[in-house]
Amino acid sequence: MSTWRDYVRRVEPYTPGEQPNQPGMIKLNTNENPYPPAPGVTALAEHLPTDRFRLYPDPAASELVNELAAFYHVGRDQVFVGVGSDDVLAMVFQTFFNRNQPIFFPDITYSFYPVWADTFRIPYETKPLDADFCIRKEDYYEENGGVIFPNPNAPTSVLENLDFIEDILKHNRDVLVVVDEAYIDFGGRSALELVSRYDNLLVVQTFSKSRSMAGMRIGYAIGQAEIIKALNDFKYSFNSYTMSQAALMLGAEAVRDRVYFEACTEKIIKTREWVSEELKALGFVFNEPWANFIFASHPKYPAKELFDALRKEKIYVRYFNLPRIDNYLRITMGTDEEMKTLIRFLKAYMK
Ligand code: PMP
């Protein structure tokens, strides 16, 4: 028997949300945006200059970097881009989390963090959220190898304010503090305004939610130039061309349309407001949601039972069979029509 099997790097993979593809389904399980990308993106996609596919893309991704720098009023040397924020975050872990001390993140959070830490052999410690699912900032004052948390947090949809983030930054001047802002555009205040004052802050965002482009795989990070240079050096050490030419062009086009971006996120916030009221009227309990999803529990109906009942109706929401959150559903905001169908079903079910 050949021995190569003894030398396989065994890893525990991340489990992404289900991607069902059924006619008539209502897909509220992976926090995608129910609306199309900006009209300019669709127009460009229909006429992509395929002659440019023949050539390698610009390794510096300048067209996209420049648009993002202009949009956020930062220097071009302050923006790093990658294949979704998963790619950006994986590189952040490898580039900056190299101390012997454990990195810190919440116990209930984006479940990819422990997977990357294990894969890259980075020691980590999780810090329990309090009973209201809030991060306890004092837990992050001890010596550590780096700090990362989403804001708003996932899957809880709970937002922390900028004073809170600044407090964590001040207590961690010697390590990188990464704020994963995958869901910040749905009403939260971004930590980007702290970047100029903290050389240990990195803000990571994505095109997957607020810009309706999960399928294009575009993520980015903004921080001081020295951090961005370290990330680019790391990227160039194993793959110069991480992003496709199509993603670079379509991503840049999406950023050019601020009006559509704001209208689209505003629409989802409005949907979240009325859906919150309806869910409360049905007896659901949840924290004030700040992402494009609501994380809700019901005192009478077990979450798993509701999840299964919804699934039979081809309404897909997310259920996590994990300690402390196994009686919650994470419900992504779809179109108003889709959400009306969900509420109608719940009302009939709970009669
Ligand atoms: N961070 C958080 C908190 C997320 O929920 C997600 C979405 N799964 C990501 C990062 C990654 O998103 P993407 O790779 O699509 O940019």
Image (cartoon, rainbow, N blue to C red):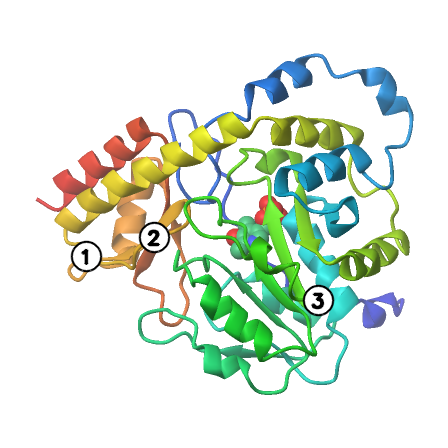
Q: Pointer 3: what residue?
A: 199
- Amino acid type, label 3: Asp
Callout 2 crowding tier (Cα within 10 Å): few <14, some 14–19, many ≥20:
many
User: Horizontally, is 20 left or right of 92 in the view?
Assistant: left
The mark found on residue 350 in the picture is: none
Q: Secondary structure at mark 1?
A: loop
- Real-space Cα separation, disc 3 to disc 1, in angstroms: 47 Å
Mark 3 vs mark 1, foreground winner is 3
Residue 23 on image: x %, y %: 42, 25
Q: Are marks 2 and 1 in contact (CB under 8 Å)?
A: no
Residue under circle 2? 289
Q: Say if mark 2 contacts mark 3, CB within 8 Å.
A: no
Depicted 52 relative to depicted 336: above or below: above
Query: Vertical placement of 37 versus 145: above or below?
Result: above
Nearer to me, 190 or 244: 190
Query: Label 1 sits on what residue type?
Result: Tyr
- In the rendered image, residue 75, in percent from the top left (x then y), is placed at 74, 46
Q: Nearer the viewer, residue 335 or 199?
A: 199
Q: CA distance from mark 2 to mark 3?
A: 30 Å
Element class at badge 2? loop
Look at 69% across and 75% down and name the residue there: 175
Choose the circle earlier in sequence order: 2 or 1.
2
Going 38% across and 47% down the picture, which residue do you hit? Answer: 293
The residue lying furthest to the bottom in this view is: 142
Give the residue type at disc 2.
Pro
Location of residue 263 in the rendering, given as x and y in whole percent from the top left corner: 43, 29
Q: Spatial distance from mark 2 to mark 1, Cα to Cα?
A: 21 Å
**Quarter in which the C terminus is drawn:** top left
